[in-house]
């Protein structure tokens, strides 16, 4: 057994696969295949133009404050023409792994690549952020870049924090492009080629080791390094932490967190990010009836779901947007728990006794939530069969399912709507799609900035009025760390760990479906 250094100067994290691609924007067609793209890993090698500040709530939870965007590779962002253009000024003297200086050409090439690959990065940058696909990024000299929006995006700097748009050293990448691979995908999958704080010193099926770069733009990180240790199962990841072979576990489920917190010398970091919903299939009975959908919203014991389903590691949610999204409010929420009213609604729709299949992830959390929901809906007059997603028969589509990890990339209302109601086709984690808002998103992006806040609010009110889905809870993102870990790793300066506050899903260890 190889124990983590006692001085805490090396971060060791359990990860599903140490052989995941380093390039975090896979080409179109590869979404949902193979191990998850670990954005936190990529942020060791690449850097973002901007990142949100990190805030602390009164209860001690951390959150990514997307109302305060801070420059990283960029020094400043200036809106022009009602936020239809943004001028970004880069830091000077920033050097890549290959020793090349960061320039506006690197930014333009990186975004051209994103658009050409037509993957998640293009959807984020163009469909959601509004960046023009042709000529949307234009160098204005060596260290200034113009971003052109098709419409208006008053919050555009938020969209510069994506790992899928991390800036590549274009000079070096072009040396490894070919006619068959003009965007150097094969090279970038396995080779550091950016402006991040670390470089790779070892990579094999068991371990991936990273060393600080003395040339990093903000100075060499004051630590010895970071490493990932392969954990092909969640249980193996927990055992590595309990045995002292790793000192960080990220993306824990409530039961895992409660198990780990019993160890001596362990601290749990809780992040306010991500949320869970219950999706209802409105294309068929019984949820084709709005009254029955409302009955679901009025039946659920939301407080018990937080306390018992999530073991207290969540909060109630009464809006469509993530609880940590700037502009989150509860306008349009009228669904206090009222079982008598829920029964009347089911009866009025002629659906008393209707059979419903509710699919949940195969986690202890999913099982508890499934039982609570089934009991509540049973009291309202529905007959609920709870199954795990893996137990569904071939071709079977449930009437409702728990979408336990919405996995938002940033905290922003436009992104929230996009990932929940206009996601790219083929995104994993969805069993059906009953509401799609692509045209509404385009209308908001085309509107002038002064009108957009009202449009977001009215869209939430419309969705809640229609009882389109159940905003179930905002669950805490849990990271366990050994107390001896060097404090620099817990600061916003260490982008890989702080990025889990905004690009958070519980599949650092293997996902539970």
Image: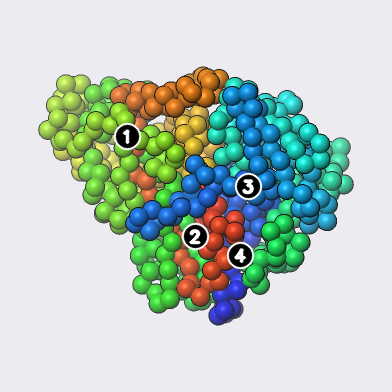
Give the CA distance from mark 4 to mark 2: 12 Å
- Residue 30 position by quadrant: top right
Pointer 1 local density, CA inside 10 Å: few below 14, some 14–19, many at least 20: some
**Closest to the observer, 15 or 158:** 158
Q: Is residue 397 above or below residue 12?
A: above
- Residue 226 position by quadrant: bottom right
Classify mark 4: helix, strand or loop. strand
Name the residue: 17% across, 31% down: 342
Query: Which callout, 4 or 1, points at the residue further toward the start of the chain?
Result: 4
2 or 1: mark nearer the eye: 1
Give the CA distance from mark 2 to mark 1: 30 Å
1 or 3: mark nearer the eye: 3
Query: Which callout, 3 or 2, points at the residue further toward the start of the chain?
Result: 3
Screen quadrant of the N terminus: bottom right
Classify mark 1: helix, strand or loop. loop
Left or right of residue 376, residue 87 in this image:
right
Residue 449 seen: yes
Q: State the residue position of label 4.
A: 228
Callout 2 touching callout 1 (CB < 8 Å): no
Q: State the residue position of label 1.
A: 330
Coordinates of residue 294 in the picture (x, y in percent): 25, 28
Residue 207 seen: no
- Residue 316 position by quadrant: top left
Q: State the residue position of label 3.
A: 71
**Closest to the observer, 15 or 91:** 91
Query: Which callout, 1 or 3, points at the residue further toward the start of the chain?
Result: 3
Classify mark 3: helix, strand or loop. strand
């Amino acid at each position: 057994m190889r124990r983590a250094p006692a001085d805490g100067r090396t971060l060791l994290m359990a990860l599903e696969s140490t052989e995941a691609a380093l390039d975090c924007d896979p080409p179109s067609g590869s979404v949902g295949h193979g191990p998850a793209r670990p954005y936190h890993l990529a942020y060791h090698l690449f850097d973002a133009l901007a990142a949100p500040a990190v805030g602390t709530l009164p209860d001690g939870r951390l959150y990514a404050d997307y109302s305060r965007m801070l420059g990283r590779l960029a020094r400043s962002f200036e809106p022009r023409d009602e936020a239809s253009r943004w001028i970004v000024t880069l830091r000077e003297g920033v050097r890549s792994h290959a020793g090349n200086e960061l320039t506006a050409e690197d930014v333009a090439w990186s975004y051209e690549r994103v658009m050409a690959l037509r993957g998640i990065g293009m959807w984020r940058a163009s469909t959601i952020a509004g960046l023009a696909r042709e000529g949307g990024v234009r160098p204005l000299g060596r260290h200034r870049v113009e971003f052109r929006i098709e419409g208006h995006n008053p919050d555009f700097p938020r969209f510069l924090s994506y790992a899928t748009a991390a800036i590549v050293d274009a000079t070096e990448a072009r040396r490894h492009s070919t006619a068959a691979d003009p965007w150097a995908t094969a090279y970038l999958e396995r080779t550091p080629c950016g402006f991040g704080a670390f470089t790779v010193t070892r990579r094999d099926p068991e371990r991936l080791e990273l060393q600080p770069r003395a040339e990093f733009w903000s100075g060499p990180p004051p630590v010895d390094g970071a490493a990932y240790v392969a954990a092909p199962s969640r249980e193996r990841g927990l055992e590595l932490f309990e045995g002292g072979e790793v000192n960080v576990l990220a993306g824990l489920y409530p039961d895992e967190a409660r198990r780990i917190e019993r160890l001596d010398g362990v601290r749990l970091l809780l992040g306010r990010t991500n949320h869970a919903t219950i999706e209802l299939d409105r294309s068929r009975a019984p949820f084709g009836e709005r009254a029955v959908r409302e009955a679901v919203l009025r039946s659920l014991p939301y407080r018990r779901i937080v306390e018992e389903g999530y073991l207290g590691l969540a909060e109630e949610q009464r809006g469509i947007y993530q609880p940590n999204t700037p502009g989150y409010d509860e306008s349009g929420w009228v669904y206090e728990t009222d079982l008598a009213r829920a029964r009347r609604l089911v009866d009025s729709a002629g659906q008393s006794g209707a059979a419903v299949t509710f699919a949940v992830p195969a986690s202890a959390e999913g099982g508890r939530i499934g039982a609570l929901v089934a009991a509540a809906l049973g009291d309202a007059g529905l007959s609920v069969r709870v199954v795990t997603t893996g137990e569904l028969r071939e071709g079977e589509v449930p009437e409702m399912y728990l979408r336990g990890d919405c996995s938002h990339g940033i905290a922003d209302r436009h992104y929230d709507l996009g990932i929940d109601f206009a996601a790219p086709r083929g995104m994993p984690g969805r069993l059906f799609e009953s509401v799609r808002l692509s045209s509404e998103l385009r209308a908001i992006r085309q509107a002038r900035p002064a009108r957009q806040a009202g449009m977001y609010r009215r869209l939430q009110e419309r969705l809640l009025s229609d009882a389109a889905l159940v905003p179930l809870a905002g669950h805490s993102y849990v990271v366990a760390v050994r107390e001896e870990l060097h404090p620099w790793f817990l600061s916003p300066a260490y982008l890989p760990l702080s990025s889990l506050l905004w690009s958070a899903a519980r599949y650092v260890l293997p996902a539970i479906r």
